Amino acid sequence: GQQVMQIPQYQHVQEGEDFTTYCNSSTTLSNIQWYKQRPGGHPVFLIQLVKSGEVKKQKRLTFQFGEAKKNSSLHITATQTTDVGTYFCAGSYGQNFVFGPGTRLSVLP
Amino acid sequence: KAGVTQTPRYLIKTRGQQVTLSCSPISGHRSVSWYQQTPGQGLQFLFEYFSETQRNKGNFPGRFSGRQFSNSRSEMNVSTLELGDSALYLCASTTSSGNYGYTFGSGTRLTVV
């Protein structure tokens, strides 16, 4: 069935270091969304990418959608302790969105 | 505007019992999806309702069911509870297509003992 993979599963970084999480699908996606879930919280929508090769930025966060629309990445520049949480991608195959397993980010001060 | 409201926030049930969880979506959102979240399994999709009809369904046993009312409020029911059903149940609402992102509620933490 439709499946969205994410790597890495966990990432520990020192505050100030960069962080990247990757999302992959075996089939072409209509679009992709990214969410952040803080510890003890619920997922919060960050952004949606629709076009092939699309790049969007939100302050220190950079989101990319691959040319083939099968993969995406989220890059955080100079992480801060407030970036701690689990980052999920959710890929659309038409009508429904499939969530990836998430990447849990720890930031050491 | 008010967010997605889930009730109750916490619930403790005994094996074999049944439970009903409630979700009130954002006003104007007609799609409501339910997810089960456990530490080892991430976000597992249960089902989605749109205009009172189940539009999509995940791979969960028939013990898990749901419904949606005409005001878009949704309920999910789990019958014959098992220990493995202990999880955070999240509901998310969106517009018809989901293309503006899903808004999640704070969830219901279910513990089965």
Image (cartoon, helix red, strand yellow):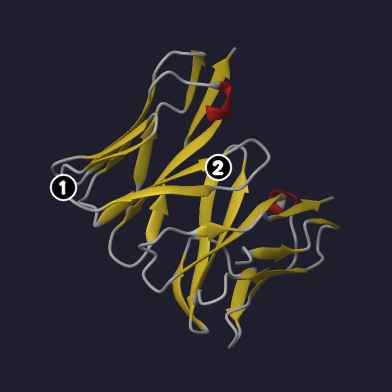
Q: Chain of mark 1?
A: A
Residue B51 seen: yes
Q: Is residue B28 left or right of residue A100?
A: right
Q: Quadrant of the N terminus of chain B?
A: bottom right
Element under disc 2: loop
Tell me the number on the disc at residue A86: none
- Identify which residue is drawn at 64% across, 66% down: B2
- Splitting the image into 4 quarters, where does residue A88 fall? top left
| Residue B11 vertical position relative to residue A100 in the rendered view, above or below | below
- Nearer mark to the viewer, of 1 and 2: 1
A72 or A99: nearer the eye? A72
Mark 1 and mark 2: Cα distance apart in space: 30 Å
Give the secondary structure at mark 1: loop
Q: Which residue is mark 1?
A: A52
Q: Residues within 10 Å of mark 1 (few under 14, many from 20)?
A: some
Q: Is residue A80 above or below residue A74?
A: above
Q: Chain of mark 2?
A: B
Q: Is residue A77 above or below residue B13?
A: above
- Residue corresponding to mark 2: B41
Name the amino acid, label 2.
Gln
Residue A1 visible in rendering: no
Count of marks overlaid on the render: 2
The spot of residue A35 in percent (x, y) is 46, 45
- Identify the residue shown where x is 35% and y is 48%: A3
The residue lying at 14 percent from left, 44 percent from top is: A68
Tell me which residue sits at (55%, 42%) in the image.
B41
